[in-house]
């Protein structure tokens, strides 16, 4: 709804809410997802992201509320349009 032009789903909708990051990345790639949005700032140090076929955008904000992330929507859209396979991009909220 907010990311127009993109097909979006949550880990909960996919039944993957309890899946850990390494396995989640593999599931996303196996199911031909192009991009993952996450608030997990530690993913870049917890996972080996080389040779990944998925782009990752990390949302850095003071909280994980939708209203806060919606304030970042323009930057998210720009990052999505520029992200390539295997890229990790961090987007910082203006009040972070």
Image (cartoon, rainbow, N blue to C red):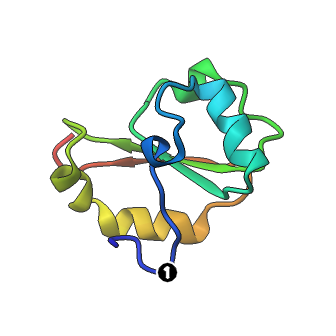
* Residue 62 left/right relative to 36: left
The picture places residue 91, in percent across and down from the top left corner, at 39, 50
| Residue pictured at 25% horizontal, 49% vertical | 93
Quadrant (top left, top right, bottom left, bottom right) of the N terminus: bottom left
User: Between residues 74 and 7, which one lies in front from this camera angle?
Assistant: 7
| Residue pictured at 70% horizontal, 39% vertical | 27
> Around disc 1, counting alpha carbons within 10 Å, would you say few (fewer than 14), some (14 to 19), or many (20 or more)?
few
| Residue pictured at 67% horizontal, 45% vertical | 28
User: Between residues 30 and 42, which one lies in front from this camera angle?
Assistant: 30
The picture places residue 12, in percent across and down from the top left corner, at 43, 41
Q: Residue furthest right?
A: 51
* Residue 94 left/right relative to 59: left
* Residue 33 left/right relative to 72: right
Q: Residue furthest top?
A: 46
Query: Which residue is identified by label 1?
Result: 5
The picture places residue 54, in percent across and down from the top left corner, at 70, 50
| Residue pictured at 48% horizontal, 56% vertical | 9
* Residue 8 left/right relative to 1: right
The picture places residue 96, in percent across and down from the top left corner, at 21, 40
Q: Place residue 67 in its image quadrant.
A: bottom left
User: Between residues 1 and 57, which one lies in front from this camera angle?
Assistant: 1
User: Between residues 13 and 5, which one lies in front from this camera angle?
Assistant: 13
Helix, strand or loop under label 1: loop
């Amino acid at each position: 709804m907010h990311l127009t032009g993109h097909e979006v789903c949550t880990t909960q909708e996919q039944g993957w809410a309890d899946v850990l990051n390494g396995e989640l990345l593999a599931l996303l790639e196996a199911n031909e997802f192009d991009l993952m949005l996450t608030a997990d700032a530690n993913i870049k140090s917890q996972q080996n992201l080389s040779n990944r076929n998925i782009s990752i955008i990390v949302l850095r904000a003071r909280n994980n509320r939708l209203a806060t992330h919606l304030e970042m929507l323009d930057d998210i859209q720009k990052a999505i349009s520029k992200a390539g396979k295997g890229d990790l991009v961090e987007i910082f909220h203006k009040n972070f």
